[in-house]
Amino acid sequence: KDNLLYPKGPGSGAAQILNNSKSTLRVGTLSAIDSWESNAYSLFMPLVSDGRAEFRENVLRDCMLHLPIPLNTQSPMAISLDSIEYQRKIENQLLGGLDDETDSCHTLKRPFKPLFYTDSSLYCTSMPFQDGVEYGSPDDGLIIRPTKLGLFILHVTGNFPPTYSLNLLERCFQPFGL
């Protein structure tokens, strides 16, 4: 049996965004997608709907997505209280500290670089925050896939190769014709 989400699968979060509308599914690290999902459809759909080779080459070469997706710092499971506190510590160090009011509303936007396309999806890999900051790359990624209902976004851990995560997502969608 295929498992898409942790603990037996590569996904630490998932969201299904309806055509230019609200999400119908939000779990794990993407459970806070409400804060940015109004832009997610218009941001992601052009990246995955145009199949022209030249367009895709330009996306892979020139595009960088900055998204408020939590770090997977301690384990690939959905965010725990400890990892939230750890992420806040990193955010404060990276951003020079924030006052309490700003800190409660702030979400660090992490860079994700489009890495490769498949016939149906785009895989983006996380990148280091800044040059010279020694937090490294958390090695997680995003799979962005158009569906008949809109867009499906899967946040995956680095514990599985990208091709495994992509193939598993396709196997899970295949019976439904999505």
Image (cartoon, rainbow, N blue to C red):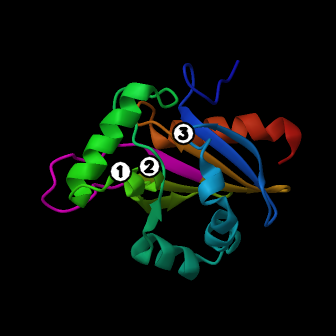
66 within the magenta span:
no
Q: Position of residue 116 (x, y in %)?
A: 49, 59
Q: At 59% across and 44% down in the image, what residue appears?
A: 30
- The three-letter amino acid code for the residue at tag 1 is Asp
- The three-letter amino acid code for the residue at tag 2 is Ser
Please give the residue where the numbered disc 1 appears in the rendered image. Answer: 100
Mark 2: secondary structure: helix
Q: Marks 3 and 1, Cα distance to the nearest angstrom?
A: 23 Å
Q: Which residues are magenta?
A: 126-143
Q: Is residue 109 visible?
A: yes
Q: Marks 2 and 3, Cα distance to the nearest angstrom?
A: 18 Å
- The three-letter amino acid code for the residue at tag 3 is Thr
Mark 1: secondary structure: helix
Q: Which mark is residue 104?
A: 2
Q: Marks 1 and 2, Cα distance to the nearest angstrom?
A: 6 Å
Q: Is residue 108 visible?
A: no
Q: At 82% across and 63% down in the image, what residue appears?
A: 19
Which sits earlier in the primary sequence, circle 3 or circle 1?
Answer: 3
Quadrant housing residue 1? top right
Q: Position of residue 64 (x, y in %)?
A: 42, 69
Labelled pair 2, 3 in contact (Cβ < 8 Å):
no
Q: Is residue 11 left or right of residue 37?
A: left
Q: At 16% across and 54% down in the image, what residue appears?
A: 133
